[in-house]
Amino acid sequence: MQVSILEEHGLDSALMGLGFSYEEETNHLPAVPGYTDKIYKRAVQLAKLDKGHNKFLEQIQVWSVIRASMAWWKQMDTYRVGISKSSKSTMHTLMKSPLKTWHFTDDVTLETVRYLENVRQSKNFSKLIAELPMGYLQTRLVTMSYKNIRHIITQRRGHKLPEWQEFCSFFTDNLKHPELLGLN
């Protein structure tokens, strides 16, 4: 599995919105989003609470590129609400270049890769798709919120599929504000 973060945005605006519930009411909108240390500390406290208390996390967005096995993507597709994904299309790319071992996880044998390459060369797309193992690696651009990430990590950090451990560790170690996941 390979994961990278392309962009992370929305903290100032999310905390400004959170501040609406805790700051003194004014009769004008702020010209520039901003927040106080008091609001940030409150956000850290609320982050670990669900049931709407941490809804400000929905407004902090992360764009990442993830390359993972089809087996992992099958499980990741469980998380679809509030998450957007774009993938490298197997339909458009699978037949264009020879299949190599680096297209697959380590547990896919060289014999399997050779067999699939022969199927690809025969131009039998339907058979190739039908026989493509769950260890085939696919790259997707994924957009999700801190709230999505928190939800996934709380459900999957102890999962037996090693890629979930990598996913959870990557995001807890690489987000700009991991304390806002409320996982500690």
Image: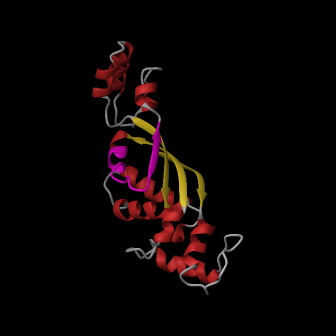
Q: Position of residue 178 (x, y in %)?
A: 53, 67
Residue 130 visible in the snapshot:
yes
User: In terms of image quadrants, where is residue 119?
Assistant: top left
Name the residue located 43 percent from the left edge and 64 percent from the top edge: 150
Q: Is residue 91 above or below residue 124?
A: below
Q: Which residue is drawn at the image coordinates 47% and 34% (left, top)? A: 88
| Residue 5 % position (x, y) | 56, 51
- The magenta segment is 72-87
Q: Can the viewer see residue 1 in this picture?
A: no
Q: Percent from the top left, x then y, of residue 32?
A: 71, 70
Where residue 103 sits: x, y (%)? Answer: 44, 31
Question: In which quadrant of the rendered image does the N terminus lie?
Answer: top left
Most foreground residue, 142 or 138: 142
Q: Is residue 77 magenta?
A: yes
- Determine whether 98 is above or below 173 in the image: above
Q: Which residue is rendered at x = 34% and y = 33% of the image? A: 108
Q: Indicate left or right for 34 with 50 as reference.
A: right
| Count of marks overlaid on the render | 0
Q: Residue furthest top?
A: 122
